[in-house]
Amino acid sequence: MKTILLYLLLLYFIPIVSAQNLICSPQDKEAFHSKMEFISTLDTEDIGAHMVTVGKSFMGIPYVAKTLEVGETESLVINLQGLDCTTFVENVLAFGLMLKSHKTDFDSYTQNLETIRYKDGKLNGYASRLHYFSEWIANNEQKGLLKDVTSEIGGMESKKDINFMSTHRELYPFLKDSDNYIKIKASEEFLRRQSICILAQDQIEAQEHLIKSGDIIALATSIKGLDITHTGIATREADGRIHLLHASTGSMEVEVSKLPLTDYLKSVKNNIGIIVVRPQ
């Protein structure tokens, strides 16, 4: 009996790995069902309001870096117990798609997450993950999930060589593999040919009224070779101002910024402005 109990206990804590390269613990599977129960109570057709409501349901969840760097091969990692800024946004959007499609099953959720996280919606190794957030935006816009509205609210085009990963190869263990490295270089070449539209930091307050609750906010940076350093979701709070709902590296948990977005950004080192993306 003790052996059986020990086996069951171990089974509870060992992640589930499927043939479809899926990594998900029983706790995360349970968290998914709890989230779906919550979502089923929502009756709003406003995707922006839904993004904020679902996003706030994650408040207090710990910030955990590198949650997707699991195992020796790229897998679809489901982690609702710890989130970084990107996986927070991805999960909120994935649950938003569940509401839109009127689906509640786990397979649909994992398909949504794969669609959002990977190039053209297909997991095909490490390099298929949308590592650079500007490419994440462009690829998900092609899928019809998002619309980059930065230019519509006063943003200006900016050209920059994006090559941080290939020029800092030592920081990314998976880039020891030459095939991964070559494919990441190809992504960087794609981004080199693209322009990025950025709403400058000193223009945000004047254009704040055009930002909607539920918009995805990406923080552009002056760091050489890098496009985006952080992301979150816009939420208009009781003070009438836009704040940032995000997995914060300051408080180390999902929170709403205490300061309005414009003031919050002043304390973000190397920030030059934002990209504003609207879920469709």
Image (spheres, rainbow, N blue to C red):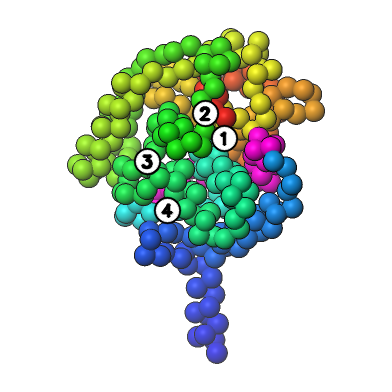
- Pair 3/4: label in front: 3
Which amino acid type corresponds to the residue marked 4 in the rendered image? Leu
Contact check, label 1 and label 2, Cβ < 8 Å = yes
Q: As drawn, which residue projects farthest toward the bottom?
A: 1
Q: Which residue is mark 3?
A: 119
Q: Around disc 2, counting alpha carbons within 10 Å, would you say few (fewer than 14), some (14 to 19), or many (20 or more)?
A: some
Which quarter shows the N terminus? bottom right
Q: Which residue is mark 1?
A: 280
The reply, left or right, for residue 37 in relation to residue 228 is: right
Q: Which mark is residue 93?
A: none
- Pair 2/3: label in front: 2
As measured in the structure, the alpha-carbon distance from the residue carrying label 3 to the one carrying label 4 is 13 Å
Would you place residue 120 above or below residue 162 in this image?
A: below
Which quarter shows the C terminus? top right
Contact check, label 4 and label 1, Cβ < 8 Å = no
**Of pointers 1 and 2, the one earlier in the residue sequence:** 2
Q: Which residue is mark 2?
A: 147
- The secondary element bearing badge 4 is classed as strand
Would you place residue 120 above or below residue 224 in this image?
A: below
- The secondary element bearing badge 2 is classed as strand
Q: Around disc 4, counting alpha carbons within 10 Å, would you say few (fewer than 14), some (14 to 19), or many (20 or more)?
A: many
As measured in the structure, the alpha-carbon distance from the residue carrying label 2 to the one carrying label 3 is 17 Å
As measured in the structure, the alpha-carbon distance from the residue carrying label 1 to the one carrying label 2 is 7 Å
Q: Residue 188's spot in the image, x, y percent? A: 30, 28
Residue numbers of the magenta segment? 46-70
